[in-house]
Image: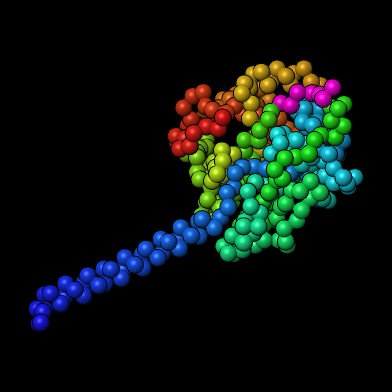
């Protein structure tokens, strides 16, 4: 049977279309497979800060903020304070010449082995092998494009161990000021580079951005499988000085009522050389109160949701509970 030129052209065109669909389908499948390779990142597991005087920091985090100290089998281990069974604040001695006192941020994952394989497949520099702590916590180290130290952590099923001297602590406990680390932030120079790492590779999602005037100074990047977020503190070399690093590199503790939290703090004695600020509503529409540890690292208290419309852009993700 003979076919016409028009019929032949139609058949060739159809074959090309089918082939293109197959190629596109394969590409989508590979992209989906790449995304599915990444294990869940469920939130912030730990924030680590440097300290020049561990005793002063112990008073700030343990006595003033009321966080119980986590038991350790090693006298040389950093101090660690439990915020919840899944989150902690670590305090380690500052290296000589330190000017940036935010040591690192740790993100929780449900499968540390899969996370390592995924990072390697994405050509993310991973330092060494997976390490295991005595309590069963497993972790690995990486760095973002700007050199910030990032830790990925798989906690044991039971969470953190009990506080040191738990019986005495329960008898004379100071009520913790918070039970959740909402977010942590650090200085960012190159948003595009950080987005390639946190958004494109790790799956973080932008929830809000804002700033003073016409500038974008803060960008909230939420973890892909939870409600905690990383805050890009966009660096303006013309406006910032070296002394601002403790204000910009910070973490935030969630509280249901900022005024009640402020009242709690007023009843606790603290070194007057490290004052805390009065509550205020930030440009993001949330009540907040800024505290500063003995080395000037900002420990922000923040309510969970906004009480007024935020400036600059709407929230694209629901408030944490």
On the rendered structure, is 1 left or right of 266? left
Is residue 98 found inside the magenta-colored segment of the image? no
Q: Residue 53 or 254: which is nearer the viewer? A: 254
Residue 258 location, quadrant: top right
The residue range painted magenta reads: 170-177
* Residue extending farthest bottom: 2
Asked if 244 appears above or below 276 in the picture, the reply is: below
* Residue 170 at least partly seen: yes
Question: Could you tell me which quadrant the N terminus lies in?
Answer: bottom left
Is residue 171 found inside the magenta-colored segment of the image? yes
Residue 2 point in image, percent of width and height: 9, 82
Q: For the stretch drawn in magenta, what is the main secondary structure?
A: loop
On the rendered structure, is 313 left or right of 42? left
Question: Could you tell me which quadrant the C terminus lies in?
Answer: top right
On the rendered structure, is 126 left or right of 6? right
* Residue extending farthest right: 75
Q: Residue 158 or 191: which is nearer the viewer? A: 158
* Residue 213 at least partly seen: no
| Residue pictured at 16% horizontal, 72% vertical | 10
| Residue pictured at 62% horizontal, 21% vertical | 257
Residue 284 point in image, percent of width and height: 52, 31
């Amino acid at each position: 049977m003979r076919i016409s030129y028009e019929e032949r052209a139609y058949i060739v065109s159809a074959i090309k279309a089918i082939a293109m669909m197959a190629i596109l389908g394969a590409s989508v499948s590979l992209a989906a497979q790449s995304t599915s390779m990444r294990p869940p990142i469920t939130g912030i597991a730990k924030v680590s800060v440097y300290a020049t005087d561990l005793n002063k920091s112990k008073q700030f985090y343990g006595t003033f903020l009321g966080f119980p100290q986590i038991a350790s089998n090693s006298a040389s281990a950093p101090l660690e304070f439990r915020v919840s069974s899944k989150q902690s604040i670590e305090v380690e001695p500052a290296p000589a010449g330190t000017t940036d006192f935010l040591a690192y941020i740790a993100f929780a994952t449900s499968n540390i082995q899969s996370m390592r394989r995924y990072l390697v497949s994405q050509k993310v520099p991973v330092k060494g092998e997976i390490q295991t702590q005595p309590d069963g916590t497993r972790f690995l180290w990486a760095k973002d494009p700007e050199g910030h130290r990032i830790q990925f952590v798989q906690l044991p099923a039971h969470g953190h161990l009990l506080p040191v001297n738990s019986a005495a602590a329960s008898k004379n406990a100071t009520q913790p000021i918070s039970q959740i680390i909402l977010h942590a932030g650090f200085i960012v120079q190159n948003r595009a580079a950080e987005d390639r790492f946190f958004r494109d590779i790790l799956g973080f999602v932008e929830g809000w951005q804002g700033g003073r005037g016409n500038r974008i100074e803060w960008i909230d990047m939420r973890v892909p499988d939870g409600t905690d977020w990383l805050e890009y503190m966009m660096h303006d070399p013309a406006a910032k000085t070296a002394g601002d690093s403790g204000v910009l590199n910070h973490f935030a503790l969630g509280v249901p009522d900022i005024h009640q939290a402020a009242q709690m703090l007023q009843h606790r004695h603290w070194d007057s050389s490290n004052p805390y600020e009065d509550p205020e509503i930030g440009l993001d529409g949330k009540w907040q109160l800024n505290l500063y540890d003995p080395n000037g690292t900002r420990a922000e208290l923040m309510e969970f949701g906004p009480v007024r419309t935020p400036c600059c852009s709407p929230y694209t993700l629901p408030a944490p509970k």
